[in-house]
Amino acid sequence: RAQQSSVINSGYVDQAIAVITSVLIVVLNMGLPYVMKATCSLEVHKNETSKQNSIMTKLCIVRFFNTAILTFLVTPADSVLDRELVTSVQAILIMDLWLPAFSRLLDVYNLVMRYGMGKRAADQQALNRLFGGTYWRLAERYTDVSKTLFVCLFYASIVPSGYAIVAVCFLITYFTDKYLLLRRWKEPPQYGDAMTKRNRLMCLFGVLSHVC
């Protein structure tokens, strides 16, 4: 009985560590676009599409490494099939399912501009600018989805439930972003197709990681 109690307690500890780690990883991924934006501001780009393409490439590499590869590298070779890694990957996918979508729906910047600063607007033009919506980055949205897909494919052999979790995640992402795009976000500039082509290449790495 004491041994069973010890195993149960150990399981709770593993789950708590997995949840805390997954929260840190997801929050770090949410903050990375601001770092990449600051980095790309030091570069020279001929148009907005080129700039967003550069941000997307950097974000893909960093997010792929931070979310999937780093977790794999810090896991001992003889513990790859252990419950701890499976629990950790599942926690990352589940946290990635709701936390980013919730933070986008909360949209603190838009709320502050409309209902905080809007009351102090000097004229109608200033008020219209405050109601212009939240600036968003297509590069960030591309990498957010491709990163989740990469984690699912990378660990599919040991976490087959990831397919179901990611399917629900994509469904939530679709409806969340559709609502924000039509109701809250600022109208984006006209982009070319360079980011779409680059994102296909990034998704190909996810497929290759699954096959290998």
Image (tube, helix red, strand yellow):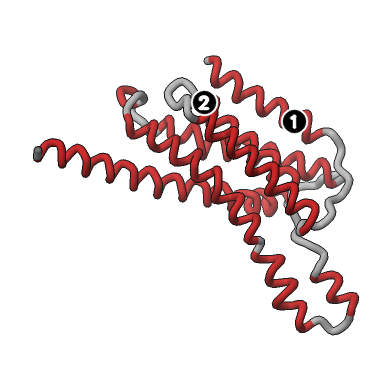
* Residue 100, above or below 207: below
Q: Residue 111's image quarter?
A: bottom right
* Residue 211, above or below 123: above
Q: Quadrant of the N terminus?
A: top left
Residue plotted at (64% across, 65% down): 108
The one nearer the camera, 196 or 160, is: 160
What kind of residue is marked 1? Arg
Reading the image, the residue beneath label 1 is: 198
Q: Position of residue 42 (x, y in %)?
A: 73, 51
Left/right placement of residue 70 relative to residue 191 reads left
Residue plotted at (80% across, 47% down): 44
Residue plotted at (15% across, 37% down): 4
Left/right placement of residue 8 relative to residue 161 reads left
Q: Position of residue 40 (x, y in %)?
A: 72, 48
What kind of residue is marked 2? Phe
Left/right placement of residue 50 relative to residue 164 reads right
Counting every numbered tag in the picture gives: 2
Q: Label 2: state its secondary structure.
A: helix
The answer to whether mark 2 and mark 1 are in CB contact below 8 A is no
Residues packed near mark 1 inside 10 Å, few (<14), some (14 to 19) or many (20 plus): some
Reading the image, the residue beneath label 2 is: 154
- Whichever of labels 2 and 1 marks the residue nearer the N terminus, that label is 2
Q: Position of residue 166 (x, y in %)?
A: 57, 34
Of discs 2 and 1, which sits in the foreground? Answer: 2
The disc placed on residue 136 is none
Distance from Cα at disc 2 to Cα at disc 1 = 19 Å
Left/right placement of residue 22 relative to residue 15 reads right
Farthest top residue?
212
Q: Label 1: state its secondary structure.
A: helix
Farthest left residue?
2
